[in-house]
Protein backbone atom coordinates (compact mmCIF):
# COMPACT_ATOMS: atom_id res chain seq x y z
CA UNK A 1 0.00 0.00 0.00
CA UNK A 2 1.27 3.42 -0.80
CA UNK A 3 3.05 2.51 -4.03
CA UNK A 4 4.72 5.92 -4.16
CA UNK A 5 7.05 6.09 -7.15
CA UNK A 6 6.58 2.42 -8.20
CA UNK A 7 9.85 0.76 -7.11
CA UNK A 8 8.39 -1.76 -4.64
CA UNK A 9 5.37 -2.47 -6.85
CA UNK A 10 7.62 -3.08 -9.82
CA UNK A 11 9.91 -5.37 -7.80
CA UNK A 12 6.94 -7.40 -6.55
CA UNK A 13 5.64 -7.75 -10.12
CA UNK A 14 9.00 -9.20 -11.12
CA UNK A 15 8.81 -11.71 -8.25
CA UNK A 16 5.29 -12.98 -8.93
CA UNK A 17 5.92 -13.19 -12.66
CA UNK A 18 3.26 -13.71 -15.32
CA UNK A 19 1.28 -16.16 -13.17
CA UNK A 20 0.63 -13.53 -10.49
CA UNK A 21 -0.90 -10.10 -10.27
CA UNK A 22 0.36 -7.01 -8.47
CA UNK A 23 -1.72 -3.90 -7.84
CA UNK A 24 -0.03 -0.84 -6.39
CA UNK A 25 -2.38 1.43 -4.52
CA UNK A 26 -1.96 4.97 -3.28
CA UNK A 27 -4.25 7.64 -1.95
CA UNK A 28 -2.44 10.24 -4.07
CA UNK A 29 -3.33 10.55 -7.76
CA UNK A 30 -0.05 12.41 -8.29
CA UNK A 31 1.99 9.49 -6.93
CA UNK A 32 0.00 6.99 -9.02
CA UNK A 33 0.65 8.99 -12.18
CA UNK A 34 4.37 9.06 -11.34
CA UNK A 35 4.32 5.30 -10.70
CA UNK A 36 2.65 4.61 -14.05
CA UNK A 37 5.07 6.90 -15.87
CA UNK A 38 8.18 5.46 -14.19
CA UNK A 39 7.29 1.77 -14.34
CA UNK A 40 9.97 -0.08 -16.32
CA UNK A 41 8.64 -3.62 -16.12
CA UNK A 42 8.36 -5.08 -19.58
CA UNK A 43 7.47 -8.72 -18.85
CA UNK A 44 4.91 -8.12 -16.09
CA UNK A 45 2.93 -4.92 -15.84
CA UNK A 46 1.58 -4.07 -12.41
CA UNK A 47 -1.70 -2.24 -12.15
CA UNK A 48 -2.10 0.98 -10.19
CA UNK A 49 -5.26 2.03 -8.38
CA UNK A 50 -6.33 5.15 -6.51
CA UNK A 51 -7.46 3.67 -3.22
CA UNK A 52 -7.45 4.22 0.53
CA UNK A 53 -5.67 1.38 2.33
CA UNK A 54 -8.47 1.25 4.89
CA UNK A 55 -11.07 0.53 2.22
CA UNK A 56 -9.59 -1.87 -0.31
CA UNK A 57 -11.64 -2.54 -3.41
CA UNK A 58 -10.71 -6.22 -3.63
CA UNK A 59 -12.63 -9.38 -2.81
CA UNK A 60 -11.49 -11.28 0.27
CA UNK A 61 -9.45 -14.16 -1.08
CA UNK A 62 -7.17 -16.52 0.82
CA UNK A 63 -4.50 -16.29 -1.90
CA UNK A 64 -4.27 -12.51 -1.64
CA UNK A 65 -1.24 -10.94 0.00
CA UNK A 66 -1.35 -7.33 1.08
CA UNK A 67 1.71 -5.60 2.38
CA UNK A 68 2.78 -2.21 3.54
CA UNK A 69 6.32 -1.47 2.47
CA UNK A 70 8.35 1.43 3.73
Image: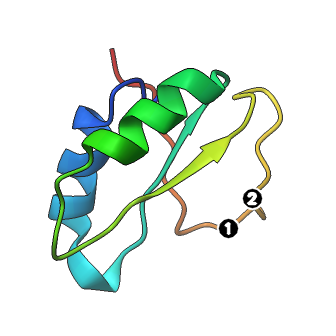
Q: Residue at x 56, y 23 (%)?
A: 30
Q: CA distance from mark 1 to mark 2?
A: 8 Å
Figure check: 9 above or below 23: above
Between residue 9 and residue 58, name the one nearer to us.
Answer: 9
Marks 1, 2: nearer the viewer: 2
Residue sticking out furthest to the bottom: 19
Q: Do we see residue 2 in this rendering?
A: no
Q: Is residue 66 left or right of residue 70?
A: right
Q: Is residue 26 left or right of residue 43?
A: right
Figure check: 13 above or below 68: below
Figure check: 38 above or below 44: above
Q: Residue at x 18, y 61 (%)?
A: 41
> Which of the 4 image quarters holds residue 8?
top left
Q: Which residue is mark 1?
A: 61
Q: Which residue is mark 2?
A: 58
Q: Residue at x 67, y 67 (%)?
A: 61
Q: Tags 1 and 2 in contact by the CB under 8 Å rule?
A: yes
Amino acid sequence: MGCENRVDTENLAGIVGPSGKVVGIDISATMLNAARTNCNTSSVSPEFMLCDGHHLAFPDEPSMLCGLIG
